[in-house]
Image: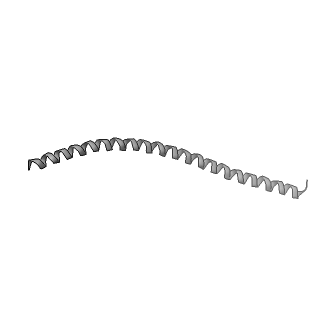
Amino acid sequence: MTWEIAVGMFGIISAFIAVMNVVVKINSTLSKLESAVLQLKETMEQQSNKNAHFYTELSGHEKRITVLENQRGMER
């Protein structure tokens, strides 16, 4: 085996290791991103449920305020 072959093999192995290093980092980043998106989705669903509850409650208060304003307007 000549030194050219050894250098060539070393170059090929080094390139493979460099590419695999990038692939592993991208895979790790994508996994973290997927986890963050799922957590964000759950949080948004919880917030949507809270907002629906508050909207229902505020709607009831708005109706009561309207009734009170109409009663007060009739007294004047």
Q: Nearer the viewer, residue 5 or 50?
A: 50
Q: Position of residue 53 (x, y in %)?
A: 34, 41
For the image shown, how many numbered marks are present on the structure?
Answer: 0
Q: Position of residue 52 (x, y in %)?
A: 36, 42
Q: Is residue 15 above or below residue 63?
A: below
Name the residue at the left extreme.
76
Query: Residue placed at 61% from the left, 47% from the top?
Result: 28
Above-or-below relation of 9 to 49: below
Position of residue 13 relative to residue 60, above or below, is: below
* Colour theme: one colour
Q: Quadrant of residue 48?
A: top left
The picture places residue 44, in percent across and down from the top left corner, at 44, 45
In this view, the residue farthest toward the bottom is 4
Please tell me which residue is depicted at 83% across the width and 54% down the height of the picture. Answer: 9
Residue 14, by quadrant, is bottom right
Query: Which residue is drawn at the image coordinates 52% and 46% (left, top)?
Result: 37
Q: Is residue 44 left or right of residue 18?
A: left
Is 40 situated left or right of 66 in this image? right
Give me the residue at 9% from left, 47% from top: 75
- Asked whether, in this view, residue 33 is left or right of residue 43, the answer is right
> In the image, is 18 to the left or to the right of 46?
right
Kindly give the residue lying farthest to the right in the view shown. 1
Question: Where residue 5 appears, x then y in whole percent?
Answer: 87, 56
